[in-house]
């Protein structure tokens, strides 16, 4: 359970950093408390999308992994972020990704920030 909470908080922080850096990713709200709740909810949705949908997408795109030497992972991560944005819109959360290129850059930033925080915090 602790690992789930820590991973969700790491994803939330990574999404917040991506929204801060990428102009095409919008995290709006009246105050920082509403933004915090929104980004945690978005991190939960992002984790759920990555847990349920991403394995199937990776399985069906296996030939592309071989052909691109794994670089298709960036595109799949961008699509998962874009799907998270769509689900957030359906749930009336104040999070939106404005296109594929914003999703691609945002997914790259989320990956780097998550990797760095996981490295700093360890697996314990």
Image (tube, rainbow, N blue to C red):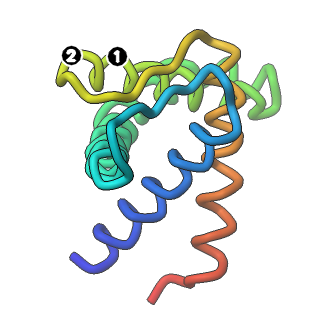
Instruction: Tell me the SS state at disc 2.
Output: helix
Residue at figure coordinates x 56%, y 26% from the top left: 25
Whether residue 73 appears in this view of the structure is: yes
CA separation, marks 1 and 2? 6 Å
Pick the quarter of the image with the C terminus. bottom left
Tell me residue 3's x, y (percent). 34, 75
Residue at figure coordinates x 50%, y 58% from the top left: 13
Number of numbered labels in the structure image: 2
Tell me residue 107's x, y (percent). 62, 35
Q: Are marks 1 and 2 in contact (CB under 8 Å)?
A: yes
37 versus 114 height, above or below? above
6 versus 108 height, above or below? below
Which of the pair 56/104 is nearer the observer?
104
Identify the residue at the far top of this view. Answer: 99
Badge 1 is on which residue?
86
Whether residue 51 appears in this view of the structure is: no
Which of the pair 10/74 is nearer the observer?
10
Tell me residue 32's x, y (percent). 38, 52
Q: Residues within 10 Å of mark 1 (few under 14, many from 20)?
A: some
**Which quadrant of the structure image shows residue 73?**
top right
Identify the residue at the far front of this view. Answer: 30
Q: Is residue 6 left or right of residue 68?
A: left
Residue at figure coordinates x 75%, y 34% from the top left: 70
Q: How crowded is mark 2: few (under 14 residues within 10 Å), some or many (20 or more)?
A: few
Q: Is residue 43 left or right of residue 65?
A: left
Identify the residue at the far bottom of this view. Answer: 124
Residue at figure coordinates x 39%, y 23% from the top left: 85
Instruction: Tell me the SS state at disc 1.
Output: helix
Residue 69 has which mark? none
Badge 2 is on which residue?
90
Tell me residue 74's x, y (percent). 69, 30
């Amino acid at each position: 359970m602790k690992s789930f909470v820590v991973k969700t908080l790491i994803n939330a922080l990574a999404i917040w950093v991506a929204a801060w850096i990428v102009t095409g990713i919008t995290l709006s709200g009246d105050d920082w408390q509403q933004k915090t709740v929104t980004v945690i909810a978005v991190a939960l949705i992002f984790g759920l999308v990555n847990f349920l949908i991403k394995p199937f997408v990776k399985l069906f795109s296996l030939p592309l992994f071989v052909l691109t030497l794994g670089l298709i992972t960036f595109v799949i991560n961008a699509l998962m972020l874009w799907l998270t944005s769509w689900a957030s819109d359906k749930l009336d959360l104040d999070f939106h990704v404005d296109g594929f290129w914003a999703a691609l850059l945002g997914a790259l930033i989320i990956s780097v920030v998550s990797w760095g925080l996981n490295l700093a915090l360890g697996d314990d």
